[in-house]
Amino acid sequence: MSFSVAVAGASGYAGGEVLRLLLSHPDAEIGALTGGSNAGTPLGTLQPHLVPLADRVLEETTPDTLAGHDVVFLGLPHGQSAEIAAALPDDVVVIDCGADYRLTDPAAWERFYGGPHAGAWPYGLPELPGQRDHLRGATRIAVPGCYPTVSTLTLAPAVAAGIVDPDVVVVAASGTSGAGKAAKPHLLGSEVMGNASAYGVGGVHRHTPEITQNLSGLTDTPVRVSFTPVLVPMPRGILATCSAPLSGGGPHLPADDAYAVYEKAYAAEPFVHLLPQGTWPQTKSVVGSNAVHVQVTVDEAAGRLVAVGAVDNLAKGTGGAAVQCMNLALGLDEGTGLSAVGLAP
Amino acid sequence: MSFSVAVAGASGYAGGEVLRLLLSHPDAEIGALTGGSNAGTPLGTLQPHLVPLADRVLEETTPDTLAGHDVVFLGLPHGQSAEIAAALPDDVVVIDCGADYRLTDPAAWERFYGGPHAGAWPYGLPELPGQRDHLRGATRIAVPGCYPTVSTLTLAPAVAAGIVDPDVVVVAASGTSGAGKAAKPHLLGSEVMGNASAYGVGGVHRHTPEITQNLSGLTDTPVRVSFTPVLVPMPRGILATCSAPLSGGGPHLPADDAYAVYEKAYAAEPFVHLLPQGTWPQTKSVVGSNAVHVQVTVDEAAGRLVAVGAVDNLAKGTGGAAVQCMNLALGLDEGTGLSAVGLAP
Amino acid sequence: MSFSVAVAGASGYAGGEVLRLLLSHPDAEIGALTGGSNAGTPLGTLQPHLVPLADRVLEETTPDTLAGHDVVFLGLPHGQSAEIAAALPDDVVVIDCGADYRLTDPAAWERFYGGPHAGAWPYGLPELPGQRDHLRGATRIAVPGCYPTVSTLTLAPAVAAGIVDPDVVVVAASGTSGAGKAAKPHLLGSEVMGNASAYGVGGVHRHTPEITQNLSGLTDTPVRVSFTPVLVPMPRGILATCSAPLSGGGPHLPADDAYAVYEKAYAAEPFVHLLPQGTWPQTKSVVGSNAVHVQVTVDEAAGRLVAVGAVDNLAKGTGGAAVQCMNLALGLDEGTGLSAVGLAP
Amino acid sequence: MSFSVAVAGASGYAGGEVLRLLLSHPDAEIGALTGGSNAGTPLGTLQPHLVPLADRVLEETTPDTLAGHDVVFLGLPHGQSAEIAAALPDDVVVIDCGADYRLTDPAAWERFYGGPHAGAWPYGLPELPGQRDHLRGATRIAVPGCYPTVSTLTLAPAVAAGIVDPDVVVVAASGTSGAGKAAKPHLLGSEVMGNASAYGVGGVHRHTPEITQNLSGLTDTPVRVSFTPVLVPMPRGILATCSAPLSGGGPHLPADDAYAVYEKAYAAEPFVHLLPQGTWPQTKSVVGSNAVHVQVTVDEAAGRLVAVGAVDNLAKGTGGAAVQCMNLALGLDEGTGLSAVGLAP
């Protein structure tokens, strides 16, 4: 089954990653490519690694240029997806890599993003319990944020099983591509190389309500999330260090039991890989792949469960998830065109 | 006042950093330099950045080669300082950059390091309340670990003021030089570049009891510490993201009040720099310097105080602290030969 | 057509890259994996990115363990391939990623490598004029060195066309993985990050005679090669800056003419990509791929042709070339399982 | 002797480096700090590593704000220095970190920079033969470009001694800070990390005529320069690999003789450090310092002398040279406030 795909925002990192993956998808025919200020430029200038598409010239991002494809990926700045999506026929599969349709709570949207809430689409994290069914055959899908993907998957089994109190702490070290391709002085190579810095500290980062929403959906009690992102000198990858008090504050939970909970949760997942006990995740193992690596243990002295997850923010954290969701939407095998093998060293 | 200095372990990162700083100390005369397996090698081959010492040949690390100096720095593998120190006269200032004399609790020593506990020397963190007085004129000083330095200073004001519960979470992103200069495959450039990885997860890292000891000394209740180190791709620097529940679990603490607590605590400290509110620390600002940069806020939704600190693990985290302590021991101005200005970009 | 493959040296960078690529090869069945000191260790510990092979346990590198496969890749330290290869049947395809069989001149071998010369196998650079035919159906193939691959392909059209004098200068900036996975102090992350260094200067690097051999084969006059490798802080990739005097010393050669020479030379090559005029290669565009990116111009004032090439030293520079050669040896489509699309950013 | 200093362009990399060095200069009193679009912003926001100046607010860059100081440093975009300089009294020491007054040949200026040629000031490279005398007491000094500094010093002894033909090839790997602090997409951390790229290839980089001017001044024959800059993933540092044919094309030059030529040339230079034979420069050894590290050898087979130099582009390559020149201009010891000790690892 062959199908046609258009990508809006093809000059950005999300759009570029979707295209990189589609180039090894056996059934996708790459159609219109659009870009905001880059319309008129050949893709070879903007994404020189996408050699087979080097001569494609970017068009303007309008419903007209995107029309007539089976699938449309949106890799647009936050707030710009709604208008485009509304103009596309209902039977076109629209997959939004932006934040517009991720949050179900309009108040959370307004507090963290401002402006009117566009609504909520099926949330593209098939590894959440029961979520895969909502994505099969869907025609509108919201791809999760990169931090929420790894934070949620790293904590979900513990929260769902009730072995921790609903009061989690996430500190996530991220590569720089999550900040996008817009040129800002603090993202210059000269600034980020040799440098680790915290930002969005104190619960103000926009991915906070999304993590909260995901984890709270797994349990009866609202989950409190303390989330701190840290920028570290690498282009891709997020390593999320997550912890929560052992539930009840007292009862002893052997590390083996915690591990067993995770083992059971992810036994059938093709892209979530619980590492052998004692081995801890590293981002390099998942770079370029759709895999999430997870490990968990118990710190008895501190009374906390500690879990660590690694993801490639552009792959499983954005473009890979987008293609995975597309496969589900189209009724294809979920892993078509995707790999669980990272690029190392 | 001129004085003579010997450095044991001059071929390592700690010894090299002590020497780098001593080269700009107006009164220090650099005497014997020793190195384990590198004895007989000119320093220029091992530490080519220390140009003025390029022709110095390393001697063997014995009490004899180190004798006859006013100050002896020990930059030796853990467990090797005791024998050397015991053989040096009591009036020689001996400053140990290793872990041997940091912990006061023999049980903690045995659990985390193994082997017999050598004892405890005055702890070289002058910024701890009351600690400076213990270092003036001391002839034996234990330089703190790098993670404990930044974690302690980032949390101390909050813990001492009782505005948080004694149950802290520290996730610290560190450059690779903290792991030393011994060649191990997982520390190869090919492995660490483009990679973030967790290690020593679950309360097993050796710096955990040291952080616990420091913070517990500031309050009546033992402090529980959940500490996770993360290796990130930079040679120097640690960024510690620290948080703890607001005390009492309930009362509202305005971020301004938390900031005021820190402001008061560090107003007179020459090397701890509380950043202007809203500005968050980055390691690049402190690289090469003896400064610690700190910021604090309150995450109301999560009910936690969040503080972030940055330090150069080799400078204020090791060699800078060693020189600072030497200055106190010798009755010099504490900051002689040290700088609060980092190397950026 | 399905075939079985064994990999000797599966714990190293070359072996790991061969396996990474074979995992997406539609017809390869991965059989025995061997490793020197790592025999008995599961691959998941050594190459955690190769998730599907995580449970495979490395065997000892002996002819017995490697026997019974259709293809055997050798990723062994220099000098160790001959004995293994001699013990394998003639009809097994043996592809040596090491240097043992690259040089045709025993004197050059002895001068640069020492020890007896094992001989010369068909040289696995199908892009050299006429070379592809020597590789189709071959059962013994020597994979080129990484620097020779990119240096040769960057200069070959100019040398073959006689538009430059046979007196070339190559300065190649390389990532660290080319130095292998053996732990050495100068390759530690702490040493290489933030650092550029020259090594093997003055014509002493072992890849010098290989570049000389390749280029001299394209013309009637022996080519003189000044080759300097530079280590730069990245895990993968080589950027080779190559130049040579315009032939005759005098006649003016328009840059367009030089470009046309290259265009003609590489028009039909699936993996050598001459960039649009004015665009210069970067290693990031080829990372993880089997592509070589090339650009050329003329510096009239200096009287030199200047060409720049980029390659992933582990992919097209080693493992990719090995798989490409295997495809030729087996009569498959040359590009099976390989991609010309790099991983960026 | 105390003197006052103003810095125009204090928010940029050149200005920031001048300030970093002035903060450890015993006699400098830092006065007005100005910045283009950053006027009105506290320096702490823009250069957070310069802690002692954190509260200084940038003023507009006008002759008025700069007036009344003994020394004025200009760290302005090319073409903006002339107007400011003309408005400052003749007896004020004006040190231009930009390119405006470096080239003596108006035609070269126009070809490479465009626009009218402002003129030529004493060239701030005291290590050039005879040049130091021109800088003592000077009131207008042009600080050399970073590439020209290291390229010139790496080749000067060979060119001046006539042991090479006047036909040099320079390939220089540079960190990113040389490109300045203006945000451009190709300089983003996501783009430069893990990436080596060539730019300004074919003799078109603006530093080409400056290298040519410097080397041609050392000999009777005009020197031809083939210069290629390569961007590599580090914030600071340049490693220049330089070579030239041995003079006469024939006579054998022992490497020891070449080394002796360099030894003699730099014996008395405080900041140019010829490494012990067999040791090759690395940028890390000179980061943050005013040192240049140099090594030289002969490649007999290629008939070339090969020399490599390392410099910190912001320190000796810009701000350090500026302070060194200021010291000469004011009659101070040339090395005041400067160090030959680099920051490693």
Image (tube, coloured by chain):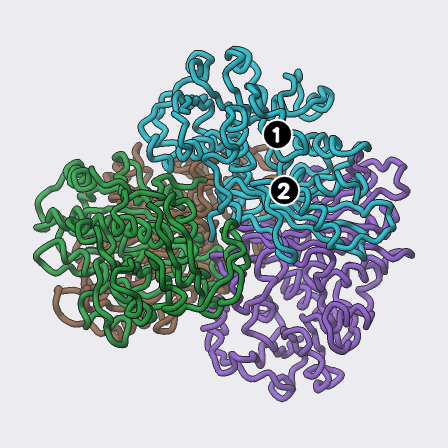
Chain colours: A green, B brown, C cyan, D purple
Question: Residue at coordinates 83% horizontally, 50% vertically from top-left?
Answer: D167
- For the N terminus of chain B, give its image quadrant: bottom right
- In the rendered view, would you say B118 is above or below B219? above
Image coordinates of residue B82 in percent, x first then y, are 39, 37
- In the rendered view, would you say D119 is above or below B189? below
Is the residue marked by circle 2 packed among few (<14), some (14-19), or many (20+) residues within 10 Å? Answer: many
Is residue B84 among what the camera can see?
Answer: yes
* Residue carrying label 2: B44
Amino acid type shown at disc 1? Arg
Q: Nearer the viewer, residue C169 or D296?
A: C169
Image coordinates of residue A154 in percent, x first then y, are 24, 48
User: Label 2 vs label 1: CA separation?
Assistant: 49 Å
- In the rendered view, would you say A242 is above or below A57? above
Is the residue marked by circle 1 packed among few (<14), some (14-19), or many (20+) residues within 10 Å? Answer: some
Question: Residue at coordinates 39% horizontally, 59% vertically from top-left?
Answer: A7
Subunit under mark 1: C
Local secondary structure at mark 1: helix
Q: Are marks 2 and 1 on the same chain?
A: no
* Residue carrying label 1: C132
Amino acid type shown at disc 2? Gly
